[in-house]
Amino acid sequence: MVELSALDWLVLGGFFVLLIGVVWMSMRQREKDTADYFLAGRNAGWLVIGASIFASNIGSEHLVGLSGAGAQSGMAMAHWELQSWIILLLGWVFVPFYWSSKVYTMPEFLERRYNSASRTFLSVISLVSYVLTKVAVTVYAGGIAFKTILGIDTIWGIDFFWISAVGLVLITGLYTVLGGMKAIMWTSVLQTPVLIIGSVVILVVGLDKVGGWTEVERLNDANMHLIRAATDSEFPWPGVIFGSFIIGFWYWCTDQYIVQRVLSAKGIKEARRGAMFAGYLKLLPVFIFLVPGMIAYALNAKGIIHYDSADQAFPTLVSELLPSGVKGIVIGGLVAALMSSLASLFNSSATLFTIDFYKKFKPESTELHLLRVGRIATIVIVLLGLLWIPVMSLIADVLYEYLQSVQSLIAPGIAAVFFLGLISKRITAAAGYIGLVSGFIMGMIRLVLLPFRDDIQGTSIAWITDMNWLYFCILLFVLVSAIMVVVSLFTKQCDDEKLQGLTFGSISKSQWSEMRAGLDKWDYIHTAGILAITAFIYIRFW
């Protein structure tokens, strides 16, 4: 439990006042069309793009879960937080295709590259996964986090979990509906520094209390290593290196949730530099979320603090180490992380529904009508998230057991379809659709069988659930890629005219010009800087 003083509540109140001010300023710029509502008028600069990408990525699983992972397994989970170089791929390689095609969604891009069936299938997969996993889990985790950290059980006889979860959804949903993408991106500019400042304070105070970095290394010992044995049951190094890349490629380069931010850019230069800024910010979670968990482990070992489970590492550090006022900043950081992730999910889900379903089946709709549909869709997504919370509370133990592996089952098929589709004109429309469907089916087979792992031991299909989740992710990617190549050999290739500008081999001169526009030495310097810092961390903790 974190005891908050009057000063802490004053700091939190100030944060919300600033948040309301930013939302109000965004609302004054009324949206004229869907580009305004879903893509901030395609007028975003690199600062808001980078901040929005980072803020959208950071959720309660980072502040609470990643700290817990640091306390339990040390640097093992750092691989997923060292994917800045994949964000650079988004900025340097994929942005020119996405931005110049003027698409609103990733399914829409797949329709351009493959066919309408691919667009519809990816839209369905994305919407279902957003509502039933990302939205619901963020809300559920937020409710649990606030109840645990604040130590409040009930208010007026109502479980505080429900008050915090519902309040989080309603407040976030309100400014998402009213302000659209502009409100989301500008509030990210406010939320990102609050989040970083609060976490850095914990890091600095924790290091001081434990006796410095040398003590953290000594007490965490073997958990300081990034690379584990190939036989490690959870994080074998081949699985981590290749499996995390597949999941990271899907998340950072093809998922609507993230890519929608760069689609909002003024131009390719701003999108590229926004991705670079996000790349710098993405290097921070290892130090401001994971390392504090390792500090908590060291402090616990020395008897300076005490917690019962790894997930209590973060709230314990906040409650026992931080002075009044600073606690309010940290709690504000938690609020910022939850709200930014949730707002991005609401807007991305509404974008997918409005553009990939409603507009597709009612192409005669005016921009103003689609704008209303977008707002209504956002409200519906908010309500679905609320309705799913009771179900989450019933199946949370089971769902959390499989959540980490769910992305590893969704990612390979989508990643293979985007990757092969961009590097080769020979991949056909039929291959793209079959790749999506086959990858999804094979992934769901494992997901369905996982609860029955003990029952199928000794049978011919036991290997499906026994295989390490990262190795299975790699196997799925290889199988889907092979299926796509074989199907492409026996189906008709798309016309060169249709593929113009959609593959590496068909980039037009104008696209090359756009890609090179605004390039200067600083683009190369910052790219090299991000890669160098990432390499240094890997070498240091090898």
Image (tube, grey):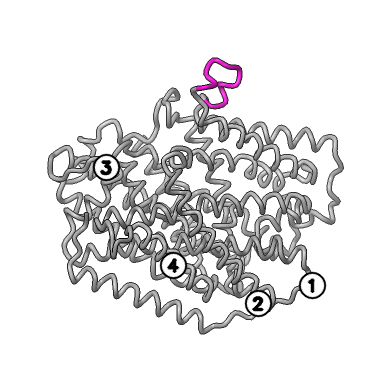
Q: Amino acid at mark 3?
A: Met
Q: Earlier in the sequence, mark 2 or mark 4?
A: 2
- Per the picture, the main secondary structure of the magenta-coloured stretch is loop
Q: Residue at x 75, y 61 (%)?
A: 509
Q: Are marks 4 and 1 in contact (CB under 8 Å)?
A: no
Residue annotated with mark 4: 188
Q: Earlier in the sequence, mark 1 or mark 2?
A: 2
Residue annotated with mark 3: 294
Q: Are marks 3 and 2 in contact (CB under 8 Å)?
A: no
CA gap between label 3 and label 4 equals 28 Å
* Mark 2 neighbour density, 10 Å: few (under 14) some (14–19) many (20 or more): some
Query: Secondary structure under badge 4?
Result: helix
Please determine whether, in this image, residue 373 is positioned above or below residue 487.
Answer: below
* Mark 1 neighbour density, 10 Å: few (under 14) some (14–19) many (20 or more): few
Please determine whether, in this image, residue 326 is positioned above or below residue 366.
Answer: above
Q: Residue at x 42, y 63 (%)?
A: 166
Q: Nearer the viewer, mark 1 or mark 2?
A: 1
Q: Is residue 26 magenta?
A: no
Q: Amino acid at mark 1?
A: Glu
Q: Nearer the viewer, mark 3 or mark 2?
A: 2
Residue annotated with mark 1: 364
Q: Nearer the viewer, mark 4 or mark 1?
A: 1
Q: Residue at x 34, y 34 (%)?
A: 225
Q: In terms of depth relative to the viewer, which is nearer, 120 or 424? A: 120
Where's residue 377, x and y in %?
61, 66
